[in-house]
Amino acid sequence: MRIVVLVSGTGSNLQAVLDAVAAGELDVEISAVGADRNGTYGVERAAAAGYETFVVNFKDYPVRSDWNRALTDKVASYQPDVVLSSGFMRIVDEHFIDTFEGRYVNTHPALLPSFPGAHGVRDALAYGVKVTGCTVHIADAGVDTGPILAQAAVEVLDGDTEESLHERIKVQERRLLIETLRKISKDGLPQP
């Protein structure tokens, strides 16, 4: 299974994937790792591990649809079976979603459909839930919507801050992502 991984930041989920591939625990071919801006540590991690990288810098495109088209074309050039959004903090348009329909996999630090959007951990804490977690799902044209592939629960502890809770969620998110990619590489993606 060929994958392209998209990152916007440090790439901690990406590192888990790189480690699992290197250890022979995950049978995927990482075709490339791309970012939406220059200077991401995720791209640096991938390059240091010997993977091809690219940047389609959002700021280089005054019109959002032009950036989306450029990103779509770049990712498509690698002919991926799966596109993995691993902390990729840009919403892609319908052209991207349609091009990779049913193959764009996203991670989210909450138990969707609860607490979608960029602040899932903060929103869960503010709501006062006792359990939150993480989700791996197929992204569609909505914000953190689409078929759920897997979820893991994380207890909210007394005194949790957004940072402390998010760190515990990330541990489960990395584990869940590897398990889900392993299952997809063995059984394929669910068909709509």
Image (cartoon, rainbow, N blue to C red):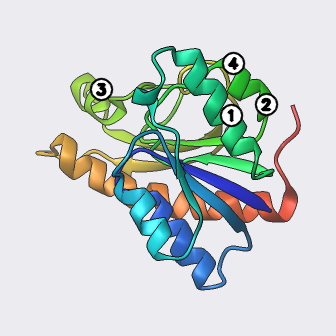
Residue annotated with mark 4? 94
Q: Residue at x 75, y 42 (%)?
A: 76
Mark 2 or 3: the one toward you: 2
Q: Residue at x 67, y 74 (%)?
A: 26
* Residue closest to the eye, 17 or 159: 17
Task: Left or right? Give the position of 148 relative to 129.
Answer: right
Residue annotated with mark 2? 99
* Residue closest to the eye, 156 or 139: 139
Mark 3 or 4: the one toward you: 4
Q: Is residue 171 above or below residue 132?
A: below
Separation of marks 3 and 4 at Cα, in angstroms: 27 Å
Residue annotated with mark 3? 123
Residue 183, percent from left and from top: 75, 61
Separation of marks 2 and 3 at Cα, in angstroms: 31 Å
**Mark 1 touches mark 3? (CB < 8 Å):** no
Separation of marks 2 and 4 at Cα, in angstroms: 8 Å
